[in-house]
Each structure stands twice: as structure tokens, then as C-alpha cells.
Amino acid sequence: MLKWAIIFFIISLLAGWMGFGRVSGAAATIAKVLFAVFVILFLFALLVMIGLIKAI
């Protein structure tokens, strides 16, 4: 997930540099959403792992 967020961020930068504003904006939005999903899933997994460690 983080890999795809980085890829879309790079696409956004390149599209913006070449003058494709709408493509850049869309890619940036997708990158933001993917990064937010990554952070939420990472925190959830971290909390689950902490819970499993405390259960042992």
C-alpha cells in the first residue's frame, strides 16, 4: 500500500512538472488516500500485536 502511495506521489510530481494539472491533482489525491489507509492499517496491526504480546 505504501509502495503504491509513493508511486502515485511520483506520478503527481512528474505530471505537475510537465504541466498536466488535473492528472497531477488526481494522482496526489489517490496518493493521500492510499497513505491514509496505510497509516490506519499500520496502527491497527500495531495495536493487535501489542494486545497479543500482553496476552502472553
Image (tube, helix red, strand yellow):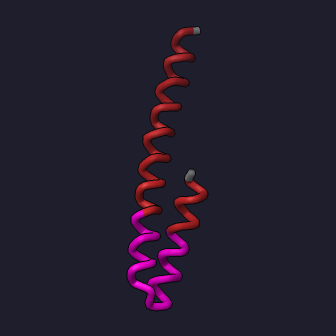
Residue 34 lies, in percent from the top left, at 47, 54
Q: Identify the residue at the far top of this view.
A: 56
Q: Is 30 one of the magenta-colored residues?
A: no
In percent of the image, x 58 and y 59: which residue is there? 4
Q: Is residue 31 above or below residue 1?
A: below
In percent of the image, x 59 and y 9: which residue is there? 56
Q: Is residue 47 above or below residue 23?
A: above
Residue 6 lies, in percent from the top left, at 55, 63
Number of marks: 0
In percent of the image, x 52 and y 60: which residue is there? 5
- In the drawing, does residue 23 fall left or right of residue 56? left
Q: Is 14 one of the magenta-colored residues?
A: yes
In percent of the image, x 53 and y 67: which residue is there? 8
Query: In the rendered structure, which segment of residues is drawn in magenta?
Result: 9-29
Q: Identify the residue at the far bottom of this view.
A: 19
Main SS category, magenta section: helix
- In the drawing, does residue 38 fall left or right of residue 56? left
Q: Is residue 25 above or below residue 29?
A: below
Residue 27 lies, in percent from the top left, at 46, 70
